[in-house]
Amino acid sequence: MSSTEKHLTLSSPSRFICIIETMNPTLSLIRKYRALDQQLNLLYSGLASRKRIPLILRRMWKNLASDEKEHLIYWKYLEREHYALNNISSREIGSSVSRISEYTRSAEKLLQKAGKDTLSLEEAFDATVNTEFLALTSPMQNFFYTHDIILEDKIFNPLEKYDLHLKRITAQAGRIYAGEPLKLNLISSMLKIKDEKDRLLLENVRDSLTGTRSRRYFFDNAGFLLNLARRENKPFALVMMDVDGFKGINDRFGHPAGDRVLSTIGKKLSGTIRSADIVARYGGDEFVIALYDQNENQVNTFLARISRALADVKIRLNRRATLPVKMSWGYSLHLPGREDSISDMIKTADRDLYKMKAMRQNASAP
């Protein structure tokens, strides 16, 4: 045992947690969000049970409480897996931790007032609006957009329902804020801000031409899935693909034709992968696919399925001419007990890809 290991073993649990959080400041933020959503779940559940609140508002708070349970699943998962967020600075994380701590303390006070039945309807709704729209000025959306989790063998992301979460609130704003145009205008402005922020963040995680995930999204998530596979002693595969003769397509038929090829392939690949897989545009005509919990036989079955899906693809250039699409690929496989990195696996898959290309070129040579 090293001296560092001895130190960690002899340290108190709180000391150990401090060391871990210093190494990974994202954990502090995750824990603060978890604590906040726990308080909100209790608060909303309590409001939903108050008989003197109109039924339509009780239903709203009941649904919000249910939404918070999903958010808690998400934060607990990230905490357990020691997720590290790379696209937010430590300074921004520290600032967010302070702000979220304030919201959590406010939620605790509101919960106490609700328990004593001294919390007014307007005060409760104001607190709901203020807390939920915290997401507009915090890194929470960066979590939701840039990282999915695997839950019951499917990719899960609470962002998919977060719009509904906010709509539950705004649908009742007219009832609560009737005669208060300033508050109604504020909610309208915040929704516009959210829509614009959504648009900008989506550009970071989705490739606009192919509809697949972006290169940035891939690197934010593939390493996490690889580490998860390593901890759970499961295989993990990485596939690199590109379009045969893509430069010739652009040179002969023009870039719009090349764009149609990439767009069509992106749709086919997205429709072929499982819900626990990631397909992303790596760059140019290259695509990369991360396959969680897939062994060599399963990878080959997957590639055969892609080959069949692409066999029928023909890009229409004009009324008479169509262009068939062919792709080459290579893959690398992580097996339990090995210490691979995403970079190593990309290099291996890339070498395998070019071997396939060389074999095809040799086979077609006179």
Image (tube, grey):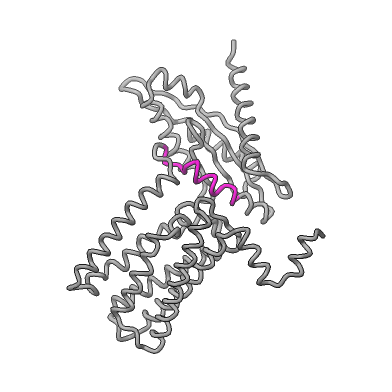
Up/down of 247 relative to 304, above or below: above
**Whole-percent x and y of residue 280?**
49, 41
Q: Which region is colored magenta?
A: 210-225
Up/down of 57 relative to 70, above or below: below
Residue 199 left/right relative to 5: left
Residue 296 left/right relative to 57: right
Up/down of 71 relative to 199, above or below: below
Q: Residue at x 37, y 21 (%)?
A: 254
Residue farthest left in this picture: 179
Q: How many marks?
A: 0
By secondary structure, the bulk of the magenta-drawn segment is best described as helix
Q: Residue at x 33, y 20 (%)?
A: 320
Q: Nearer the viewer, residue 48 or 220?
A: 220
Q: Quadrant of the N terminus?
A: bottom right
Residue 57 left/right relative to 312: left
In which quarter of the view is residue 328 placed? top right
Residue farthest top in this picture: 366
Up/down of 260 relative to 201, above or below: above
Q: Nearer the viewer, residue 115 or 288?
A: 115
Residue farthest right in this picture: 1
In which quarter of the view is residue 177 placed? bottom left
**Whole-percent x and y of residue 146?**
48, 51
**Whole-percent x and y of residue 291?**
58, 45
Residue 346 left/right relative to 326: right
Q: Quadrant of the C terminus?
A: top right
Q: Residue at x 27, y 80 (%)?
A: 54
Residue 220 among those drawn in magenta: yes
**Whole-percent x and y of residue 238?**
60, 41
